[in-house]
Image: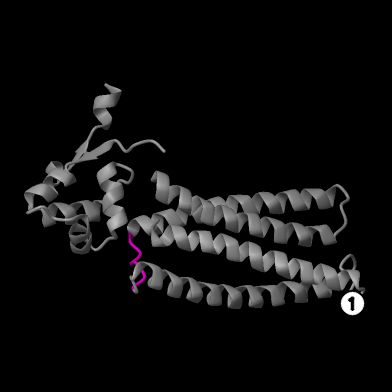
Amino acid sequence: MAKSSIQNNIRKLRFHAGEMTQQELADLARVSRQTIVAIEKGNYSPSLELAFRMASIFKTPLEEVFIYKGDADSS
Amino acid sequence: MSYQEKQNIVNIFSGLLVTIIYALMVYQRHQQGQFDLTDDFQTWGRIFLVFIGISVAVRIVIQIIFHIINAIATREEDVPLEDERDQLIKLKATRNSYYAFTSGFVLSVLGLALGMPVHWIFIAFVAFGLIAEILDNGSQIYYYRKGI
């Protein structure tokens, strides 16, 4: 399965948020821990709603949580 | 291994178990001459209806047993909540299973057009139904492991 063209800083943001665990983030985002693991690994691109919810949890703009790398590959 | 992956494995084995045991029972009765499956389509209708009932009942029992065993083994009583990723995986797996069953249906009709006996279409339905279910659960395991 091809990796997503969307990268993320969730691991770093969790660390800066008092070493928040994946389970804590999952509970706050109302998804399973497996989904957080898949997003962190780049195996799953979340819906727009979940992406905004995660950005709101970290109190940071969306583009600091997720970075789109699609254009960089094609240029 | 996640709860969903274990549940899919249980689904594959329970599907195989119920279908194979029921098919053997029906075939045994056919061999004993209790009914003629090559000619009696009313019996085929009854066989399918009974199979659906038995299949649903057995699967419910197996799911309950699985949940109890899993709760004892992992000490987690709650079933994990189903989020957007689970729903997307289920949707893609269902699509794959529909492809399998539709292909089976087309092949069966093709066989019928080429002169195969009519009762073979019922056997093909059971076989492709089982294949579709295995593909459904197998796809889910694949997507959970490899990502979507």
Residue A17, percent from left and from top: 8, 52
Quadrant of the rendered image containing residue B54: bottom right
Seen in the picture, residue B57 relative to B16 is either above or below; the reply is below
Seen in the picture, residue B83 relative to B115 is either above or below; the reply is below
Would you say B11 lies left or right of A38 here? Answer: right
Q: Is residue B40 something that shows in the picture?
A: no
Please, what secondary structure does the residue beneath circle 1 have? loop
**Which chain contains the residue that carries disc 1?**
B
Seen in the picture, residue B42 relative to A10 is either above or below; the reply is below
Residue A28, percent from left and from top: 18, 62
Would you say B110 lies left or right of B83 here? Answer: right
Q: Which residue is mark 1?
A: B34
Q: Which residues are magenta?
A: B78-83
Along the viewing direction, whichever of B72 and A10 lies nearer the viewer: B72
Seen in the picture, residue B12 relative to A48 is either above or below; the reply is below
Q: Main secondary structure of the magenta part?
A: loop
Which residue sits furthest front? Answer: B73
Q: Amino acid at mark 1?
A: Gln
Residue B45, percent from left and from top: 77, 73
Where is the C terminus of chain A found, in terms of image quarters? top left
Residue at 45%, 72% in the rendered image: B69
Residue B55, percent from left and from top: 63, 73
Residue B82 lies in magenta, yes or no?
A: yes
Which residue sits furthest top? Answer: A75
Q: Is residue A75 something that shows in the picture?
A: yes
Residue at 21%, 55% in the rendered image: A22
Residue B1 lies in magenta, yes or no?
A: no
